[in-house]
Each structure stands twice: as structure tokens, then as C-alpha cells.
Image (cartoon, rainbow, N blue to C red):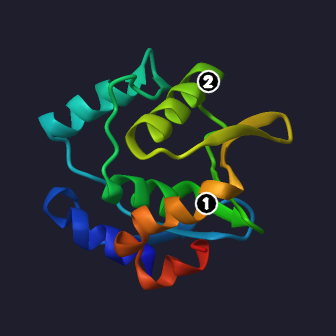
Amino acid sequence: MYVDWKYQMLQSIVKSEPKLRKGNGNRIACGFFTRCLPEITDLFHYFYKERRKMIPSDLSLDPLSLAVWYMDDGSRSGGSLYLNTQQFSMQDQETLQSILLNQYGIHSGLNRDKEYWRVRIVTADAQKFCNIIRSHVIPSMEYKLM
């Protein structure tokens, strides 16, 4: 299970093992909390400004961090791949698009999802994106790949 893998990766900075809890509606969620550490506080300040999640302009995404982001918040639909970035501002989503293009040569657009927008990796670059992250995607998440 993905949460178990993530727990193993972060075990040195978490408070306790993953626990089940009631989610939205009838859904059951599973998660854990990290400990309060200065390094994590620094990361919080890097990704949140005035209590709003944002994409730093100097963000560097290695293949592992890109894979975790996709496993957490990505999806596949037909020949397209999406990063569910709906809660980021348009400017931040454009920053992410620039990062994907400049660091990996991955072209993307913004796709309307109901009233919000999200990053859509263009079909022509979907396989390239998958090849970059493939070695870091755990078996239970391989269904998201092409």
C-alpha cells in the first residue's frame, strides 16, 4: 500500500505508524503525522506564503520528488496525464509548467476541471514523463503510468 511505502521512506521523522480514520462521506483514510522539526518547518515556509500553498520559482524537482508528487496527486486519463494542482494559483501553475519544461523538456497546458484549473502534460510528452519517474513508482501505483 502506498501509505506504507511513504511511511517507510519518512519513518525517521514521523510520530507514529499509519492509522485509519474516517474520511469524507463513507471513505476511510489512512495517514500519519510528522514530528515538529526545524527542517520540516523550513520546508513549510518554503512552500507556504501567508498560509497559502505555492510553488517556489526556484523549485528543483528530481525524478523521485516528481514521482511522489504524481503518485500523490497525479492521474491518467486516456493518453493524458494530470497533476491535480487545482489549489495552486494560476501563476504558481504556470511556474510549475516552466519548471517541467526547463528541467525535463516536458510540455504541459492548463486544463479546466470544473471551476478550477490543473496541469495537463501534453499527450506527446506523457511517455517521456512516465519514463523519467518510472523507476521510482511503486508497483501499486504503476496503473498511473503509460
- In which quadrant will I find the N terminus? bottom left
Q: Residue 123 location in percent, x, y?
A: 70, 57
Label 2: which residue? 89
Q: Residue at x 58, y 30 (%)?
A: 93
Q: Residue at x 38, y 29 (%)?
A: 47
In-image side of 38 versus 52 (left or right) = left
Q: Is residue 4 above or below residue 77?
A: below
Q: Residues within 10 Å of mark 1 (few under 14, many from 20)?
A: many
Label 1: which residue? 126
The three-letter amino acid code for the residue at tag 1 is Ala
Label 2 residue SS? loop
Q: Residue at x 50, y 30 (%)?
A: 98
User: In the rendered structure, which disc, 2 or 1, sits on the residue that comes first in sequence?
Assistant: 2
Mark 2 or mark 1, whichever is nearer to me: 1
In three-dimensional space, the C-alpha distance between marks 2 and 1, rounded to whole angstroms, equals 23 Å
Q: Is residue 50 above or below residue 1?
A: above
In-image side of 7 versus 145 (left or right) = left
Which residue is nearer to you in this view: 101 or 78?
A: 101
Q: Residues within 10 Å of mark 2 (few under 14, many from 20)?
A: some
The three-letter amino acid code for the residue at tag 2 is Ser
Q: Residue 3 location in percent, x, y?
A: 41, 72
Residue reaching furthest to the bottom:
139
In-image side of 60 versus 134 (left or right) = left
Q: Residue 88 location in percent, x, y?
A: 59, 30
Label 1 residue SS? helix
